[in-house]
Image: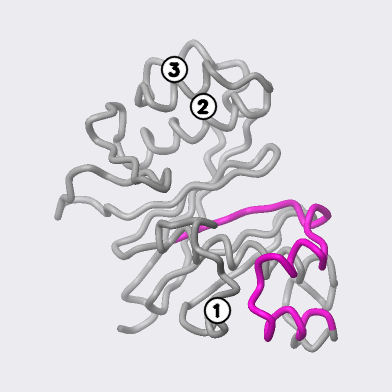
Amino acid sequence: MNITDNIIDIYIINTSTVEDETERVLPMIAPHYARKYEKAKVTNVKLQELCAGFLLYKCLGINKDEQLTISEYGKPSLNVQSIEKRTQFSLSHSDHYVILAVSDTPVGVDIERADRVTLPILKRVLPSVYYEKLKKKMFPPEIGFENDDQLMYAKYWTSVEAILKATGTGFITDPRSNPNLMDEWYLKSSVLEKHFVMSCASRTPFSINTVLIESI
């Protein structure tokens, strides 16, 4: 497959976009996300759930629970596969960002604020070969990361999360059990607002089309 054959659309929304639009958005989204919004106790978490539901509605037309299947690991997916629309998706959020990746093939996406990721945290999730490279600063220079340790830590964290989301198991699977984990996937990472890192994972080469959702 040529890299241009697999284009992953990544939709990004800031929770402030829906903050004053709750009454408009709630009737649009699938009840599953409306219930998660209602049950959440923290304002930002409520807005994240609202945004997740809104992105699924706006980008995939999901507004009914019957359109979704929630796996035993908590991963949502489309209940009915359709040749008329792209049917693989992945959601993630961090602070005021909520993102949705949509693809023709299994995909995982993750976003995290870089200052929340430390080496001790990575030691609990990274196969040892990758952890040792990070610990010894053996990573190559990358555009956008500029040998920034904190951003590189977040890059590896979000890459692992994206892979586990693509597989559908999340941290039920210990990523340290596979020493070649990150070599088995195609990965792309980028920096947002200088403080957030977003990573996307797919089994096949891909390019990314990023769309910023700025209004309801």
| Residue found 76% across the figure and 61% down from its top | 121
The Cα–Cα distance between marks 1 and 3, rounded to whole angstroms, is: 38 Å
Asked if the residue under mark 3 is in contact with the one under mark 1, i.e. CB atoms within 8 Å, the reply is no
Q: For mark 3, give the secondary structure.
A: helix
Residue 16 is a magenta residue: no
| Horizontal relation, residue 43 to residue 91: left or right | right
Q: Which residue is tagged 3?
A: 26
Asked if the residue under mark 2 is in contact with the one under mark 3, i.e. CB atoms within 8 Å, the reply is yes
Can you give x and y, in whole percent of width and height, for residue 100 in the image? Answer: 47, 48
Q: Amino acid at mark 3?
A: Leu
User: Farthest top residue?
Assistant: 23
The Cα–Cα distance between marks 3 and 2, rounded to whole angstroms, is: 7 Å
| Horizontal relation, residue 82 to residue 178: left or right | left
Residue 113 is a magenta residue: yes
Can you give x and y, in whole percent of width and height, for residue 73 in the image? Answer: 42, 48
Q: Earlier in the sequence, mark 2 or mark 1?
A: 2
Q: Which residue is tagged 2?
A: 50
The residue segment tinted magenta is 108-135
| Residue found 39% across the figure and 38% down from its top | 56
Can you give x and y, in whole percent of width and height, for residue 123 in the image? Answer: 74, 70
Can you give x and y, in whole percent of width and height, for residue 156 in the image? Answer: 67, 70
Q: Which residue is tagged 1?
A: 182
Q: Earlier in the sequence, mark 3 or mark 2?
A: 3
Q: Name the foreground residue: 124 vs 151.
A: 124
Q: For mark 1, give the secondary structure.
A: helix
Q: Is residue 119 above or below residue 75?
A: below
Q: Amino acid at mark 2?
A: Leu
Which dot, 2 or 1, sits closer to the camera?
Answer: 1
